[in-house]
Image: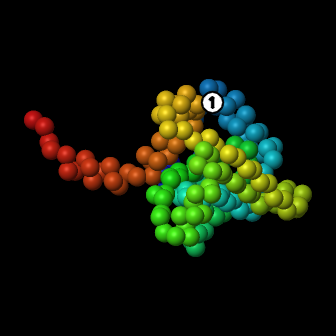
Amino acid sequence: MYKNLKTFSDIPERASGNLYYYPEFNAALQGLKFSNELYHNLTRKIAWEAVFRIRLSQGWNQLDSYGNIQIKNKTQDLILCPTIDSDRTYFYEFEKLPEETSGDQASRMRRINKNFVFIQTALLYSTSEGQRRIRSHNMAVPLTNQINEGYDWLDITCTSAFITRKALRRPASRSRVLRTMPARA
C-alpha cells in the first residue's frame, strides 16, 4: 500500500514528535535499527504539556523559530509542545535592532551592556509522575566586531541543521525564483 511521506510528516511536526523512514523495509537489514529506535522512544524520559519561551536583551528581536513546534497565535515567542524530550532541537533566529535616538529610549540604550547579548529560556512542563516543573537557563553570549572570531567558535553541525530547516520552510519562494530564471539553450 502506498503512503505519501509528506502527508505523514505533518503529524510529528504538530505533535513535537519524530518520523522514521525505512525505505523498502527489510527486517534482516534494518530490524536492529528499528528495534533500537523503538526501544529508545519507549524508554526515554518525556516531559508533557510543555510551554517554552525565550527572551533576549533589549535591542534584540526574535525573527523566527524552527523545529517541530507550535507557536501560540497571540505571541511570537511562546512555544507549545505536547511532549518534549532530550532529543529535541529548536532553533531561534534573532537580529540586533537599529538603535533609536529618542530621548528616554536613548538613555536606556546607553546603559545596556553592548559586549554581550543576554538570552533567557524558560520551560514549564509536567513530568511523567505528574509534577509541574520550571527549568530556566540564562546565558551571556559575547559579541564581537571581528567576523573571524565568530567563525572560530561556529558549530558546523548546528549551523548546517539551521540552514537546512530554514531552506525546507521556504519551498514556495524557491519555485518563484526558478520560474523567473531565464531558460538556457
- Residue in the picture at 69% in, 54% down: 120
Determine which quarter of the picture holds residue 157.
top right
Please, is residue 179 above or below residue 183 in the view?
below
Relative placement, left or right, of 155 versus 138 is: left
User: How are the colours assigned in the image?
Assistant: rainbow
x, y percentage for residue 85?
A: 74, 48
Q: Which residue is mark 1?
A: 30
Relative placement, left or right, of 133 versus 181 is: right
Between 76 and 70, the one nearer to me in the picture: 76
Can residue 52 be seen in the rendering of this structure? yes
Can residue 159 be seen in the rendering of this structure? no
Please, is residue 21 above or below residue 12 in the view?
above
x, y percentage for residue 77?
A: 60, 62
Determine which quarter of the picture holds residue 122.
bottom right
- Residue in the picture at 74% in, 57% down: 123
Secondary structure beneath label 1:
helix
Relative placement, left or right, of 173 versus 87 is: left
- Badge 1 density bin: few <14, some 14–19, many ≥20, Cα 10 Å: few
Between 12 and 175, the one nearer to me in the picture: 175
User: The C terminus lies in which quarter of the figure?
Assistant: top left
Residue type highlighted by circle 1: Gln
